[in-house]
Each structure stands twice: as structure tokens, then as C-alpha cells.
Image: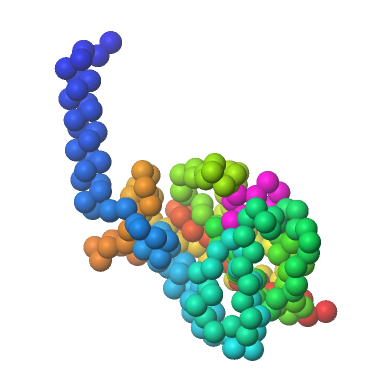
Amino acid sequence: MRSKATARVSEFVDRARMATRLRWAPEAACADEHWLRQRLNESIEEKIGSLDCANLTAVEISGTAQSRHQWKRFEALEYPAFDLCDPTPQPDRFDVVICEQVLEHVLDPCRAVKTLYDLTSPGGLVIVSTPFMVRVHELALYGLRDYWRFTPRGLGVLLENGGFEVQSVQSWGNRDCVAANLDHWAKYKRWHSLRNEPEIPLQVWAFARKPSN
């Protein structure tokens, strides 16, 4: 059994390590600041920027981050008023359906993707992102549990099995960013690397189309 003195030294070392980590990677105040979301955000921004938003309707699941674009019409569907696994009543169809950081929290991801398919107009675009190598995160206050993780291949198969034609599946991550997010959501700083290690993805995202017919 460790002595009290040894335990105090160990606690001091742990606190010092935490302080060093916080200086190297301070906590983010909002999602846009997250180190692990930088490449994801850039990719989605580029994709949406290539669209004729003024002539397209869009819906975002449990979020409003993309409302800043000048859509023909934008709607946000928030949980628990709207549940991807129990969509009652069924809302309209949209040209662009955005579902970021949601599928890991649903009980039945296959049913959730079926709802995304039903929400999408024929020929419409769906944008989906999920975390992979991040710690379990839950919001018990809102009834949000953490159930799933999807590799790039897994997310592609999930969407294909749901009827979508997958255009691309992308991912980003590196071991430094994994370490930085062990205790909190790390803020991106200029000294942080954005190199990608494909076998260590923190974020996985996909662009897919609903067949026109």
C-alpha cells in the first residue's frame, strides 16, 4: 500500500501534468474552436459553398450551425421534439439534410439513417459527421447517451444500406489531438498540428445523394 506521502507526490505530479496539458491545449469555448473539428468544418464549408444555397431548402438535425448560409428555406429539428428514431409527425423533404455529431447518440442508427433518407428530396444531398476516437460523452440532462462509433468504411456502409449513393467519406485525426481531448474538448491553437493520420481518425464524415428516381 502506498504511503500518504507517496500518494501526495503522485497527486501533485498528476496536477502538474494536467496544468501543462491545459497550457498546451486549453479548453474550447464552442464547437468552432475545437481542434478535432478544424478539417471537418473546412470540408463541410467547402461543400456547402459549392451549392446554390439560395435555391435550396435545408434542414439541420439538432443544430443551427449551418443556418448562416443564405438558404431558400432553413429549418432546425431539435431532440427530443424530433427524434430520428421515431419521427412523428414526418416533416417535409429538403434538398440538403445536415446531421452532425448525432448518430453516435441514437439508439438505432439504421433507423436514423432511414429517417434521413425520408427527409431528403430525390437527388438531394445529405451531410453526416460522427466522432470516432474520442472519449464517451453524454448529456444526461437532455437524455443524450453515447452508443456508437463508426469507422470511415462503416459510415459509408451505413449510408449505402440506407439507400444513399455515397459521394465521399473522409476522416481526420492524429495522436496529438487524441491526447489533447482525453480530459476536455481542446481548442485549436496555431502550434497544433493538422497533419492527418488515417488510422487514428477523430472525426469521420460523408457526403451522399438520394437517388433521383
The C terminus sits in image quarter:
bottom right
On screen, 92 above or below 175? below
Q: State left or right for residue 54 relative to residue 184.
A: right
Using the rendered view, name the quadrant where residue 74 is placed: bottom right
Using the rendered view, name the quadrant where residue 93 is placed: bottom right
The N terminus sits in image quarter:
top left
Which residue is located at x 78 percent, y 58 percent?
88
Q: Toward the viewer: 138 or 135?
A: 138
Which residue is located at x 22 percent, y 35 percent?
15
Which residue is located at x 54 percent, y 68 percent?
64
Q: State left or right for residue 123 relative to residue 203.
A: right
Q: Is residue 140 visible?
A: yes
Give coordinates of residue 33: x percent, y percent. Answer: 36, 63
Indicate whether residue 103 is drawn in magenta: yes
Residues shaded magenta: 102-110
Give coordinates of residue 206: x percent, y percent. Answer: 59, 67
Give coordinates of residue 131: x percent, y percent. Answer: 51, 54
Give coordinates of residue 201: x percent, y percent. Answer: 47, 56
Give the farthest residue toward the top.
1
Using the rendered view, name the quadrant where residue 95 is placed: bottom right
Which residue is located at x 21 percent, y 51 percent?
23
How many labels, in total?
0
Give the farthest residue toward the right.
213
Q: Is residue 110 visible?
A: no
Indicate whether residue 123 is drawn in magenta: no
Colour scheme shown: rainbow
